[in-house]
Image (cartoon, helix red, strand yellow):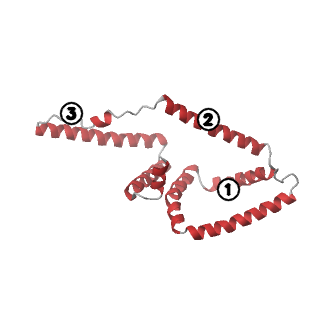
Amino acid sequence: MGGSVVDLLHWRDMKQSGLVFGSLLLLLFSLTQFSVVSVIAYLALAVLSATISFRVYKSVLQAVQKTDEGHPLKAYLEVEIALSADQISKYVDKTQLYINSTMKELRRLFLVQDLVDSIKFAVLMWLLTYVGALFNGLTLLILAVVSMFTMPLVYEKYQTQIDQYLGLVRTQVNSIMGKIREKVPGAKKKE
């Protein structure tokens, strides 16, 4: 699964990446104009219209040609779509692990186990208040999808320049954080 997602985001198969990218953008732009219930209902109606039309077309074709090929979507009706107990258990375990680690990290940040990390978190939350004032969640989701499908290509093309500038930024940030740790009492990392 991980390889196919990477291939999708790196546009290895242009048709498949374009289809997924276009579908995601269409869905997200639809959600900006209509409610979630309406979008789900319209999608279900579109799929039903296509499958019913296909089934009627094949039935008429079979009647005209006097053939008995059976249900045209029989192969899809026989595909197993149920999740096994092992799969469900695996996903629940992963979700539980993620939730527990998130709760531990939030507890560490809110109870100021490390002063510098808590201050960084506070600055991030403060910046997010401005982001939230400028964009709603759906707009941020659209920007994330567009970034997911464009940033890997840009990085592949300009990797050396990007790495050079990121190295400079990382050096500056580490220098500033070192100075802050020296000046703020109780901010030194425990070794």
Q: Nearer the viewer, mark 2 or mark 1?
A: 2
Name the residue located 56 percent from the left edge and 33 percent from the top edge. Answer: 92
Q: Nearer the viewer, mark 3 or mark 1?
A: 3
Q: Are marks 3 and 1 in contact (CB under 8 Å)?
A: no
In the rendered image of this protein, does residue 35 appear above or below residue 155?
A: above
| Residue positioned 50% across, 61% down in the render | 150
CA separation in Å, label 3 and label 2 = 46 Å
Q: Which of marks 3 and 2 is in front?
A: 2
- Pointer 2 residue: 96
Number of the label disc, if any, that sits on residue 130? 1
Q: How many numbered circles does the render carry? A: 3
What's the residue type where badge 3 is placed? Gly
Mark earlier in primary sequence (3, 1): 3
Callout 2 amino acid: Gln
Q: What element carries label 2?
A: helix
Disc with the residue nearer the chain's start (2 vs 1): 2
| Residue nearest the observer in this picture, 124 or 174 | 174
Residue holding disc 3? 70
Q: What element carries label 3?
A: loop
